[in-house]
Image (cartoon, grey):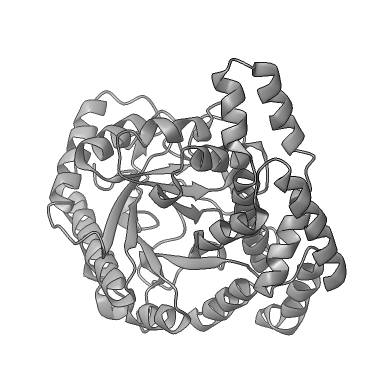
Amino acid sequence: MKKEFIEKAYELARQEYAEMGVNTDEVLKKLDELVISLHCWQTDDVGGFEKAGSELGGGLQVTGNYPGKARTMEEMKADMDKVFSLLPGKQRLSLHAIYGDFGGETVDRDQIELKHFQGWIDWAKARGIGLDFNCTCFSHPWADDGFTLSSKNETYRRFWIEHVKRCRRIGAEMGRQLGTPCIHNLWIPDGSKDLPVDRYGYRALLKEALDEIFAEEFPTEQLKDAVESKLFGIGSEAMVVGSHDFYLCYAAQNKKLITLDNGHFHPTEQVGDKISAILQFVPELLLHMTRGVRWDSDHVLTLNDESLLITQEIVRANALKRVNVGLDYFDGSLNRIGAYVVGARAAQQAFLFALLEPTSMIRRWEEAGKNFERLAYLELMKTKPFGAVWNYYCLLSGVPVAGDLIADIQKYETEIQSLRN
């Protein structure tokens, strides 16, 4: 797309939005402050570099076997660099504990140390980005019975408690060295396939484990803790120990971040509607933006009604500084770099659309009881030249505009990814 055409289209769009009191130049400055945490596990279908674990499990499943996935840490880092080069704005990287540099040795989860992730810290520092971290409480023999932090097997439970403790220490050091807080996100697959009798007992054990884990405190400028729920998973259809109710109460009581993964709720629930409610009681939120289809199938994020409602509610609540944005999907049915770029751009586009809304004007209609006028303006926004503003933002950021990114990714696939098989 020609530079002259992009600039001309933007100037027309700028004028059109200005008629509603929206300054697109200021909007783009705000958008440029948005940081999105990219999930490392899209590069290799949640494989990681651990030698001790079993096959992917714990209610997780990746569909597809598209050629060219990263097989080594070097290939993964090269892929991430390519993704960063195709995205406007700012990003950081979210690592799972199975992605450490274990040097070919078997290092069990309760033995991981900072040295296994120092290479990632150095890599991030060289790129001027932050890191987030996730304990890996799945794909391990001691998670095969469906329980980790809530396990009634004392040996297993102690193992997983130690693992999460070590992950938090590593995360805090990531935050200290990189000068930006690391968010450690805790998700466990614990649950029952069929109807359990002792739900209370399992949840009491989980609360006890969390209390012990979080007893070790770190400065918030180094580490922030988030807890993530799930409605159900493979093997936990009847009961998930860490339900939304459980973690919401725990986070509110203990001032932790609650993670909202919009694939972890009933299909008729609106995650966007939860944001303004939860922010009344917790300091911050962590988003895992994805696209659930019928269930938590972790499809590549797109610019759909769900992602738009999430971002609109954040912007309308003036909560951009209280919401941490991350992606979470793993689709092996298409080019994995393409999956990253489409999903990350969709998140950015959703926030741009929300920022371009003349919220104060529409709110005045609402407060005056002018519901027709409110609805008319919300519909009007759907026909505004949002795409012209987005293309101009990409141009300013020096990244491919519109469909130009397709050829760029195809070239990388031909020259790099296709040689891996």
Q: What residue do we see at 23% from left, 43% from top?
A: 255
Residue in the foreground of this view, choosing between 126 and 101: 126
Residue 134 position within the rendered picture, expressed as x and y whole percent measured from the top left: 36, 59
Residue beneath the point at 36% across and 48% down? 187
Pick the quarter of the image with the N terminus: bottom right
In-front residue for pair 192/386: 386
Q: Is residue 2 visible?
A: no
Which residue lies at the image location 79% right of the left edge and 48% below the top edge?
Answer: 385
Residue 39 visible in the current orientation: yes
- In this picture, residue 20 sits left or right of residue 89: right
The image shows residue 224 at horizontal and vertical percentages of 29, 56
Q: Quadrant of the C terminus?
A: bottom right
Q: Pick the residue in front: 93 or 127.
A: 127
Percent coordinates x, y for residue 3 in the rendering: 83, 72
Q: Is residue 11 above or below residue 76?
A: above
Point out residue 205 in the picture as x, y percentages from the top left corner: 18, 38
The residue under the point 39% across, 78% down is 120
How many numbered callouts?
0
Q: In this view, does 208 lie to the left or right of 39?
A: left
Q: In which quarter of the image is residue 417?
A: bottom right
Relative to 123, 174 lies left or right:
left
